[in-house]
Image (cartoon, rainbow, N blue to C red):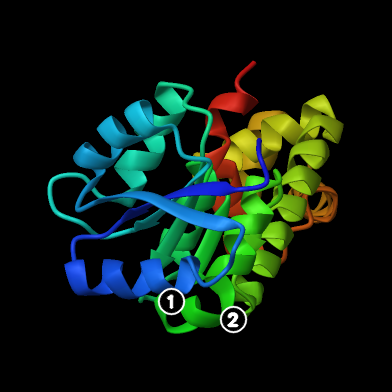
Amino acid sequence: MSDEIKTLIVDDHPIFRKGLRQVIESDARLKVIGEAENGISALELIENLKPDVVVADVNMPQMGGLELARKIREKNLPVALVFLTMHKDETMFNAAMDAGVSGYVLKDNAVTDITDCIKAVASGRHYITPALSDYLFNRSRKNIVFNEQTDGLNSLTKTERRILRLIAEDKTSREIGELLFIHPRTVDNHRTNISRKLNLHGSHALLRFALKHQSELAD
């Protein structure tokens, strides 16, 4: 990549595109090489103009940002994608990260953040607008908990797995005890050990986990 970072703007509002172009090109290293009003037009320009970075709105007619991200991944196009949105939406943020987006900036922060974001993603790094740092922390925490629970599931004994499977079938401790020929109090002890291994708190959390992983508990 040359020192000049080629950028494509994708947004369905011409006035916003014009203002964003001015902000981006205020940095001598950045050059806007094209504009598109939706994801369909953007894909064609990406393939023809070969930008280094695409800055796209999330909500657009015909093809929005998420679908554009999926198409870029499917076609294996060598471009970094930045989402620019006016909404603070954690669900959308997580969907964007799952789709392979490299940068995420709120439109309210575009003037201060977008040039730094473009330079960061062009160099292979990720950039999340500081105003959304809590979303990134929450996402990291969820991944840690998921990994802990996956490891915990693998550490369960055969009896514990059978009990967890029966919990998924909404069996009581007494019913589980009768099926496994053990005392209900022993079943309760197993429940406690299972919850500890899976980092779960409360009977409802244990039931939800059992239902979610029911297929993995089959003999």
Residue type pointed to by label 2:
Ala
> Dot 2: few (<14), some (14–19), or many (≥20) neighbours within 10 Å?
few
Of residues 209 and 42, the one drawn nearer to the viewer in this rendering: 42
Q: Residue at x 19, y 67 (%)?
A: 13
| 10 on left or right of 168 | left
Residue 11 occupies which quadrant of the picture? bottom left
- Say which element carries label 2: helix
Residue displayed at 80% across by 47% down: 148
Image vertical order of residue 218 relative to residue 16, above or below: above
* Closest to the observer, 152 or 77: 77
Instruction: Classify 54 as above or below 2.
Output: below
Coordinates of residue 115 in the picture (x, y in percent): 57, 67
Give the vertical position of 157 relative to 28 (above or below): above
Question: Whole-percent x and y of residue 121?
Answer: 63, 51
Residue 181 in view in this figure: no
Name the residue tied to disc 1.
88
Q: Disc 1, disc 2: CB below 8 Å?
A: yes
In what element is the residue under mark 1?
Answer: loop
Taking the image as shown, residue 14 lies to the left or right of residue 184, namely left
Q: Position of residue 64 (x, y in %)?
A: 25, 50
CA distance for labels 1 and 2: 9 Å
Disc on res. 131? 2
Q: Name above or below for residue 175 compared with residue 93.
A: above
* Among the 4 quarters of the image, the one containing residue 23: bottom left
